Amino acid sequence: MKALQLQEIGKPLEYVDLSPPSETGIYVSVQVLAAGLNHRDLWIQQGQYAGIQTPIILGSDAMGIYKDKKVILNPSMNWTNQSLSPPKTFKILGLPNNGTFAESVLVPARNIFPKPGHLSTVEAAALPLAGLTAYRVLFSRCKLGKNSRVLITGIGGGVALMALQFALSYGNEVWVTSGSPQKIKKAVGLGAQGGVLYTDDDWDKQLLAKAGGGFDVIVDSAAGKGFKKLIKVANPGARVGLYGGTTGKIDGVIPQAVFWKQLTICGSTMGSTVEFRKMLSFVNKHQIVPVIDKVFTLKEGNKAFQRMKSGKQFGKIVLKIE
Amino acid sequence: MKALQLQEIGKPLEYVDLSPPSETGIYVSVQVLAAGLNHRDLWIQQGQYAGIQTPIILGSDAMGIYKDKKVILNPSMNWTNQSLSPPKTFKILGLPNNGTFAESVLVPARNIFPKPGHLSTVEAAALPLAGLTAYRVLFSRCKLGKNSRVLITGIGGGVALMALQFALSYGNEVWVTSGSPQKIKKAVGLGAQGGVLYTDDDWDKQLLAKAGGGFDVIVDSAAGKGFKKLIKVANPGARVGLYGGTTGKIDGVIPQAVFWKQLTICGSTMGSTVEFRKMLSFVNKHQIVPVIDKVFTLKEGNKAFQRMKSGKQFGKIVLKIE
């Protein structure tokens, strides 16, 4: 089978021909038709991840065929029951197990789910990891209800866009931040009320003025020095979901703001099988379609990684396997 | 009536004779027999609080007599229903309304509750604010269950001690930190497993070694530079309750630890009437007796404030009104 293999950390991926993996125990073979990229794949390729073993086929997301049926894969392995945190056996498809950037992939049969009928091959491949992460952080962790005011930072990323679509579908008012005016414009096109540039020093003041007040739920994957401003724009009782840390350590948070406003800061990543199932049912009910940035062939894998590295994408980058 | 009045910010309190307040609307007059001190009183006296108006009688805690019955007062005003955060009308007894450091105090009748039968006058006066704050942060916010491992920082303060007693009574293993070996010893005397000195740079490593692992619920009122170490000693799925910020801004928190461990940081202060009622019922059921540090007369009020300022207290400082 054709596969994209990381043979050495920091090096481009190799487009190689490997013998297909053999089914063993609860692991069954799924034919992959399309595979979504995630930041995780780029970070592993760049060596910014714990426990990397090479050679490895990366990729956590896939739409494919199993027993003649169109399926998608839950990338969250061994976290079956709802719980505060995953079990010690938890792992994510694509490391240490070989992932989806190949013509076939081995997964536990319980990680296979029917493809939502309203999604194309490429759209379905873009859903699993981002959809699961967005669902858990918004609903399980930040207890998002209806008619709330939501802020999503760094719009354009897969999880952020999914969170935007989920929050809108559930009847909320959503504002965004970005480093790019074009991305804010696109987010407004999807239903966001508006947004501000986080590159402006006073973005928090601009946002409070534009939005006419603060936010009940905030979803962030940047952390870093900007995080303290999220605390400023949080309404009393707000929940701040944190699912990434691209800009580093959190500094300068005023504790009095956290306790007087009774804020809750919720760390979150991935989710359980229970949450994956709920996410799928939500996506089906609200006919949500993931935003696709660009489609590459498996052979063009390194171009896809370049696209992700550029930070220019708005939506998911997907590899189509022909 | 005799009262301790703050006439000017930063100045000692004046022991004065005032005409007793007249009942008006829902406000009724309660005869005060003993009044507990809280850090809030000291901070107001020192001008470290928003919205201070002088002259003011400080004091949020009281045991007293109302309609010939022994009562205690809920210091949390207008936060009647359970909610994520208090309503805009929320205030704490003792600012802007005159408080309990006087022979009588005006409070809404709904803030009056029966004194727990097992508590003395002084013990009952030590309960309300610390008990309410500890109850909300531990149970409502950090969802403390049974058989969990709990860490309480800065043991010796009223809320910290109450949290220690509540967590122990509910069947948990509790560890503490302090700046004083004597206070750790006293906490062990109350049932804590052990503790470490937060003045040691490597207290987090010492604690993990001593306790043989991390913590499921952490309760802290210091914040500051030490907060990042709380994140380190938190178990996956842990809740970190924050009800104070005596050492300033939170710095250096690694976001990856927050989201990979699925941590929840819960800002909390005071509580609703619902929580006050639950706290009272918990205290009655488990026959919890607040730890008393020292009792002063109303006239000796400034000595009591000095004692609190020294940081040497272990338990509540109470003014007895004779």
Image: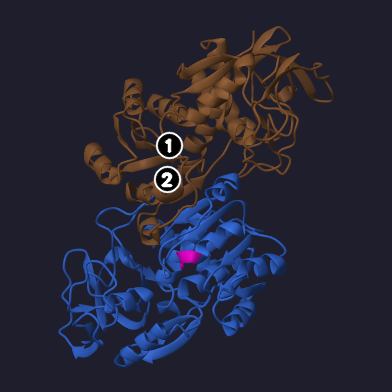
Chain colours: A brown, B blue
Q: Which residues are magenta?
A: B221-225
Q: Which residue is mark 2?
A: A239
Labels 1 and 2 within one chain: yes
Whether B153 is among the magenta residues is no
On residue B88, the disc is none
Q: Which residue is mark 1?
A: A144
**Would residue A171 be found to the left or right of residue A3 on screen?**
left
Query: In the rendered structure, which amino acid carries the disc numbered 1?
Result: Leu
- Pointer 2 indicates a residue of which chain? A
| Residue A42 in which image quadrant | top right
- Say which of A6 and A264 sits in front: A6
Q: Residues within 10 Å of mark 2 (few under 14, many from 20)?
A: many
Query: Is residue A249 in sight in this rendering?
Result: yes
Whether B223 is among the magenta residues is yes
Compared to residue B56, the image places residue B271 above or below, namely above
Task: Please tell me whether mark 1 sits on a helix, a strand or a loop.
Answer: loop
